[in-house]
Each structure stands twice: as structure tokens, then as C-alpha cells.
Amino acid sequence: MIPPELPDNEANRLKALESYELLDTLPESDYDDIVRIASLICDTPISLVTLIDKDRQYFKARKGLDVNETPREFAFCAHAINKPNELLIVPDSRQDLRFMDNPLVSNDPHVVFYAGVPLVNEDGHALGTLCVIDHKPRELTREQEASLKSLGKQVMNVMSLRKKNRLLEESQRKTEQYGKDMEAFAYSASHDLKEPLRNIKAFMQLLERNYANQLDDKAQKYIHFSIESANKMETLMRDLLDYYKSDNDMEPATLVDPSKLIKEILVLHQDQIAKKNVNITVGKLPQISITAAALRQVFYNIISNALKYHNEGSTPEITIEAKELDQYWEFSVSDNGIGIAQAYLNKIFDIFTRLHSYTQYKGTGIGLAICRRIIKKHGGEIWATSENEVGSTFYFTLPK
Ligand code: ADP
């Protein structure tokens, strides 16, 4: 018997083999089917998918054999992988110097005829073989040889596909986890920063109130700017918290009347509505099964924007309607405001996207991102149409 030599670059070959995570795994039908077909086509009692590990050959799939592995030094396949591009055919192992006193020949499973096609990965490493074995001297026809080679390619394809899927799933899982971690961080940061910020603002206001006569104009201006910045930061944190909370319903869904929610929202804006003489038309709206707080937030953000993004001088007109579709209700809020350029109609729903400076129109760029999260979570869609200087319409759908 001549023991098999180690392939060149054996360490890298073993690393490549490990990367497929197939050693010592449970049987899988894709591989089992291939060995069944190989033994049928080649008319042999035994067929195996073998993987050549450091000291053993492991059988990922086997037909006609009961053991899971045999020592590498006796493995015919360990010879086969040394010529990755060739089929190793041993017509009669008893006449072959390499195998004649091999215990697998003289004892069970009595390997007399052997044909094995190396399983070669994209980097050229032969990881194992697809082989067929008989207990008597044999040969394969050309067709049988060609079929065995094709089936070997199929084994390699299944292995590569499985590996790619696994890597993809792993990276998806990592990305999801990263997203969750980021959310948790942003949530706790905005939550924990609220109190120190409130203190800064309170002390600045005390300074402004109690020491005004001891401070010159410049110092008073600086204090004023500090309070403004603290206010801006407070709004940003409140909106951020709302954004992260918008994915977790605090209350259960109930049958909600949107007209009622809209009335409450308009009360909150009544000063602005009266000052600008806003015309608001609310059509007939259907009741919807949803968390009231979630729907309130959606209408609140869209209506607030319709009031805010308006040129001075003209009378704001806002129309709120609903249309019945097959399986959804489609709500719309139209305004005759400044409009949105076509290029930004999708982007405005991304968090922190603002089309204007803070001094022009105050805001944080979070409101529409909250709306999208809520609507998506409830199985609907949200979008906008608009014409510059004519007005915009925001649509969202909710399942009936
Ligand atoms: P915010 O209003 O706090 O900036 P939003 O997420 O609610 O944030 O809106 C994102 C951006 O979309 C706004 O900054 C504004 O540029 C644009 N936008 C939203 N609603 C309207 C509207 N009705 N008319 C014109 N522009 C709008």
C-alpha cells in the first residue's frame, strides 16, 4: 500500500474545507439524492460524497455504506484529490500497488473497483470527491464517466450555494443587530440627555431673568442664542424619541375615528389657523382599526407641515379626504403651499432630510420619517405628489 501524499498548500485546502461548515453535519437530501443517482447511473452498490479532513475522510452523503468516516491514510479519495482535474479510476484495487494491502480492500467494505471525481472549489482546492465503489473489478463507459463528472460539479454547486446563503444570512443578521443596537443607543442617548439639557436651559433662563441688569447687550444676546439652541435640541430629542417609539405601539389597536383626531390636532394649531386665516376642508373619513396615538402622529405631522410650508401672503387651503380602494383606505392631505421639487419627493421621508434652513422654516426632518415608519408598520404605503409654488398632496394607505 502507498499512503496518499498531501496536496500542495494543504493548510489552505483545509481552511477552505472548514469554510463550508459541512464536516460532522446531519444528512441533507440534496447530497443524498446525488449519491443515489450516481450509484444508479454507474450501477455500483456504493456511492459517497467524501470530504478529506486532516486525518480522516468524512462522508457527507453515503449510499451502501454504514460508517461516517474512515482514516485518511486508507482513503482512495485522498489519492484522487491530488489530481484535481482528473477522474481517478481503479479498475481492480487488488492489482494496484497503491491499494493492494489496504484494509478497506481486504476487509469491509471490500473496495475493488473505485471511480472518484474531485470536488474542486473556485480557488482550485480539491475538498473531497464524489465516488462510486464496487466489490468486483469494473470499468465505466464514457457516458458513465461523463455523468459522474457532471454530478461532481453539481455537488460542488450545492456546496457553494449553501455557503453563499449562509454568509448572506449571517451578514443580514449582523446588519439587523447593528440597526437594533444603533436604535437602542439613539433612544437611550436622547432619553438620558433630556434632563441635563432641561437644566442648562433653566439655568440660562435664570441668568437672563435675574442678572439682566448686570450684563451688557452682547452677553444678553449670547444667553438668548444659548436658550434658542437648547430649545432646538429639545425639539430634536423629542422628535427622535417619537421616531424610535413609533415602531412600538404602546396601546392596543381600537376603532378610531380620524375626524376626531383631526379636530384635536386643529385645536393645537388654532392660533396659527386663526392668524393665517387658514381654510380647512375635511371630507367624510372612515373609521380605522389602529392605535389612536399612531394615527394621530401621522395626521399631526402632515397637517403641521401643510400649515408650516406656506408662503406669507396667500391664504393656506388644506383639504383632507379619504378614498375607498379594494383592500385599503387611501387618505390624502392637500395644501396650496410652497411645493416640493420632484427630485425630493421620495427623499423627504428619510430621517433628517430637510429642504430648507432652520431659520427659513423650523423643523428637525424627522416628522415624515415617523409617518413612514408608522404607515409601513401598519401595512400601508405613504407618498407625496407636488408642484412647485402650487402645492403638495400627501397620501397614505391603511388596510381596511
Ligand atoms: P420637518 O418639517 O421637521 O423639517 P419633515 O420630516 O416633516 O421634517 O419634512 C421633511 C421635509 O419635507 C421638510 O423639511 C420640508 O422641506 C419638506 N416638506 C414636508 N412637508 C411639506 C409640505 N407640505 N410642503 C412643502 N414641503 C414639505
Image (tube, rainbow, N blue to C red):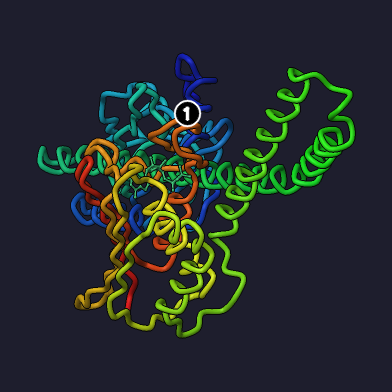
Q: Amino acid at mark 1?
A: Ala
Left or right of 110? Residue 397 is: left
Q: Residue placed at 20% from the left, 75% from the top?
A: 325
Q: Residues within 10 Å of mark 1 (few under 14, many from 20)?
A: some
Q: Quadrant of residue 54?
A: top right
Q: Residue placed at 75% from the left, 28% from the top?
A: 223
The single residue placed furthest to the top in the displayed view is 8
Determine the secondary structure under disc 1: helix
Q: Is residue 144 above or below residue 286?
A: above
* Residue 160 in view: yes
Q: Is residue 13 above or below residue 104?
A: above
Left or right of 228? Residue 82 is: left
Q: Residue placed at 62% from the left, 38% from the top?
A: 232
Residue 228 image position (x, y, % from top left): 66, 35
Q: Residue at label 1?
A: 16
Residue 61 image position (x, y, % from top left): 41, 52
Find ligand 1 in the image and state its quadrant: top left
